[in-house]
Amino acid sequence: MNFMDEEVIEMTKHARQKKRLENIENQLLHTDIVQAIKEGQLTIEDEIIEFAESSFYEDQIRMFIPTAFEEMEPELMDIKYPSSRRPDYIYTSESTSINITMKMMEQQIQEEELEDFTHTMMNILRKLQPDADMLDIGIKEVDGRQIGYFDFITKALDSKIYNLMFLFMVGDNVATGSVNCLKTEMPIWQPIAYGMMESISIENKSLDGEGVV
């Protein structure tokens, strides 16, 4: 096989992959992703991704995540999240390229300050990663609560990573979650990330079971 044949095969493969992603994007546009996630099954082409509700912090936070995701192994955690401020929960796909995290922050703010706090967090990230490509920022109402969010693309060693970060109140504390994946997986996982964010429900109760006053 000569070089030209290889080029043609590569271009054909690339065109097929592009067409497949366009079909998937079109399919996801016409799917109620949040409803599908909450019902436990999202169909993408001929693949079914199953979801189940997971609980965090003794049921204070509940969110639907893929059933195939498992808690990340400590050894991999040390590599992917070496900071002492690593999330409290990290779930990962079998390929370990798609990750879901949850962390309770020490900051205490009022709910009306959440939008400003979301912008502050985005600006901190911009300073820490000046080459990050910021995509969107906003506030959504989910389950009667405000959730601040922003998404962006960062550079990793030899690839680019898509990230969605979201922030919400649990009592007086801010909780933050994230979904990240390779940029190549973004056409599928960006809408799914937003769908998972919109599946969140929050119980305002303290860890000893007493209600938050």
Image: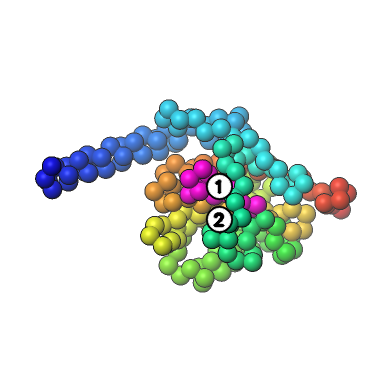
Asked where in the image residue 63 lies, by quadrant, the reply is top right
Picture layout, residue 4 above or below residue 50: below
Q: Residue at x 43, y 27 (%)?
A: 46
Estimate the spatial distance between the alpha carbons at disc 2 and disc 1, rounded to whole Å. Answer: 10 Å
Q: Is residue 99 magenta?
A: yes
**As drawn, is 1 to the left or to the right of 28?**
left
Q: Are marks 2 and 1 in contact (CB under 8 Å)?
A: yes
Mark 2, residue position: 76
User: Which percent across, then down, holds residue 108?
Assistant: 74, 63
Whichever of labels 2 and 1 marks the residue nearer the N terminus, that label is 2
Amino acid type of the residue tagged 1 in the rendering = Thr
Q: Disc 1 marks which residue?
A: 92
SS class of the residue under badge 1?
Answer: strand
User: Where, quadrant-wise, is the N terminus in this rendering?
Assistant: top left
Q: Total of numbered circles in the picture?
A: 2
Q: Is residue 46 magenta?
A: no
Q: Residues within 10 Å of mark 1 (few under 14, many from 20)?
A: many
Mark 2, mark 1: which one is toward the viewer? 2
Q: Position of residue 50 (x, y in %)?
A: 56, 32
Residue at the spot x=74%, y=53% of the render? 170
- Where's residue 114, x and y in %? 66, 59
Q: Residue furthest bottom?
A: 127
Residues in magenta, as a range: 89-102
Observer-nearest residue: 203 or 8? Answer: 8
Residue 119 visible in the snapshot: no
Q: Secondary structure at mark 2?
A: helix
How dense is the environment of label 2, judged by Cα within 10 Å: few (below 14), some, or many (20 and up)? few
Residue found 82% across the figure and 51% down from its top: 207
